[in-house]
Amino acid sequence: MSDYRLNKEAVLRALSTVEEPDLKRDLVSLNMVKGITLGIGSVRFTVVLTTPACPLKEVIRKRCEDAIHQHIGPDITVTIDMTSDVTSTRANAPTLPGVKNIIAVSSGKGGVGKSTVTANLAIALHKSGAKVGIIDADIYGPSMPTMFGAEDMQPRIFQTSDGQTRMEPVQQFGIKFLSMGLLVAPGQAVIWRGTMAGRALQQFFSDADWGELDYLLIDMPPGTGDIHLTLVQTVPVTGAIIVTTPQKVALADATKGLSMFLQPQINVPVLGVIENMSYFTPAELPDHQYFIFGKGGGQLLANQFNVPLLGQIPLVQSIREAGDEGRPAISVGEPVASEAFQSVAEALAQQVAIRNATVDQTKRVEVS
């Protein structure tokens, strides 16, 4: 065994040389190192990650081990426990105080699979250990009850001790969610003016008991209309993600949807682009890719606005079938879908952590 002095101060000095790959600061100054315990020739400590879906978990673990061996002694037994505390800029928020991050999932046009992406992303984040909810903000064409097999379910209405009427979100596959589709009969059209739809969305925020959530995903309707304005006027949004397909007509509309969030009067950070239906791979030809809707469109959009491409979701029949059956594909372990959505969820969580460390809280839009 090497000649060294093992104490907590030496451990902290060693770990202060380990940089968090995304935040570009050392683990000690970021207060990510906890619970150092020493033994004879051994050390154990906890690294508190910024999200349970951290894609660089093993990179950080290896760097910590190397730092202890390099700066204290090569023979030390190092045990590292990994936990997480999802970061947030929403401290003391008057609306949804228990929700750490509100993420708008948007698109310029319908039919690009935005609701399918939202449902599977939510479950992927939940599988990583996060607490996740969804608000189906498509008041006129809600999809989440079908996606989650909840057409016959309704939120519980209850009275609080101070006499307020509250809603308890429905829960399926570990995800809390609310949708207009839970409040009207199946097949019944919602024939409302925009102001009424906006008030319904506001009630999903203010009159529901969401509890503690790490991520609340908002499944937005297509376009850039009243619902989008209601969202940014009601709550400070952590960031937005844009779902598109590679084809030219979808990209044209996605460009408008993305640029809306970047308008100075709205100023919501765009966390990245997700390209859905990127390519088709037949089950009988797993090594073949057919680019039915074009190729590389999502990357072009991301490059145009200097935002990350969070991932590409293939066009897989089982994803559609699972959604129609009320069981999002990742919930049943469909391998192609699971790998794709888990990768995108990790990239999204990574961008949320970077955003929270580098950008101030988004301000709620004020309308004069």
Image (tube, rainbow, N blue to C red):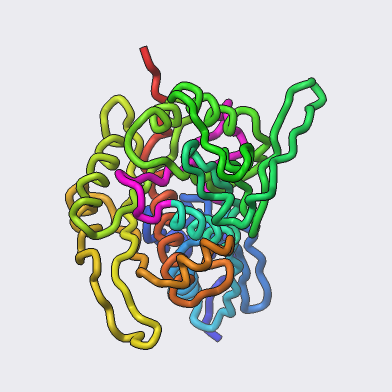
Magenta-drawn stretch, dominant element (helix, strand or loop): loop
Q: Does the magenta stretch include residue 67?
A: no
Q: Does the magenta stretch include residue 103?
A: yes
Up the image or down, 127 lies above or below 264; here it is: below
Q: Is residue 322 left or right of residue 363?
A: right
User: Which image quadrant: the N terminus?
Assistant: bottom right
139 and 188: which is toward the camera? 188
Q: How many labels does the image show?
A: 0
Magenta extent: 86-114
Identified at 60% across, 60% down, the residue is 129
Residue 365 image-quadrant placement: top left
Residue 67 image-quadrant placement: bottom left
Identified at 73% across, 26% down, the residue is 165
Q: Position of residue 59 (x, y in %)?
A: 43, 71
195 and 11: which is toward the camera? 195
Q: Position of residue 80 (x, y in %)?
A: 58, 70
Residue with the most extreme top position = 368
Residue 56 in sight in this render: no
Identified at 20% across, 65% down, the residue is 294
Identified at 28% across, 83% down, the residue is 288
257 and 17: which is toward the camera? 257
Q: Position of residue 258 (x, y in %)?
A: 28, 42
Up the image or down, 184 lies above or below 172; here it is: above
Q: Is residue 342 left or right of residue 315?
A: right
User: Which image quadrant: the C terminus?
Assistant: top left
Q: Position of residue 52 (x, y in %)?
A: 54, 60
Up the image or down, 58 lies above or below 150; here it is: below
